[in-house]
Amino acid sequence: MSRAVRDFGERRARLRRAACKGDLMAESFNADFYVTCATVIPVLFVSLAVQAQSYEDSLRRGERMPRLRRWLLLNGAYLYVVFGGIGELVALLALFERSDALVWRVTVLIATLLLLSAVITGPFYGYLRTVRHVVRRSGPGEGKVSGG
């Protein structure tokens, strides 16, 4: 094979690779963030489902709340679920396209952090209620160590 034919074949192959967005992006696309978030978001959804009883109790207590606070609580819960779904969808889309954009990255990050905060909130408030209950049950002088 002559050198001209080989050079032509190499240039043609480079042009074909350049025309394909996926090949170019695959070389520089770092999928670790999206793979991690696409794995973590469903796990956080499962955690929320396991804690559903405590969130249901919070929403039921909302019936006695002022109207604005109840509206914020209900719509906030709805937005957590919707934004988590959007974050999962964008993470999977970025992996499928092998492409990255700042808006996609921020959307997935915010969705993951929102779901994480929702998962942490239930146990944290449960812990605070338990501590408050224990402190109320103990008298003013209980729990102190007396000196010698």
Image (spheres, helix red, strand yellow):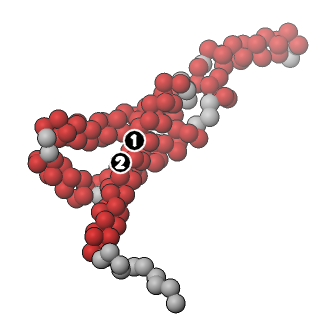
- Residue type marked 1: Leu
Give how far across and how far down residue 121 sits, in percent.
35, 52
Question: Is the residue 116 above or below the residue 6 in the image?
Answer: below
Q: Nearer the viewer, residue 57 or 51?
A: 57
Give the Cα distance between marks 2 and 1: 6 Å
Q: Residue at x 41, y 47 (%)?
A: 116
Per the image, the residue denoted by label 2 is 118
In the rendered image, is residue 46 in sight?
A: no
Image-quadrant location for residue 98: top right
Q: Residues within 10 Å of mark 2 (few under 14, many from 20)?
A: many
Q: Nearer the viewer, residue 121 or 131?
A: 131
Element under disc 1: helix
Q: Quadrant of the N terminus?
A: top right
Residue 83's tag is none
Per the image, the residue denoted by label 1 is 114
Relative to residue 35, is residue 114 drawn left or right?
A: left
- Residue type marked 2: Ala
Q: Residue at x 29, y 54 (%)?
A: 49
Residue situated furthest right in the rendering: 3
Whether the residues at callouts 2 and 1 have beta carbons within 8 Å, the answer is: yes
Give how far across and how far down residue 118 sits, in percent.
35, 48
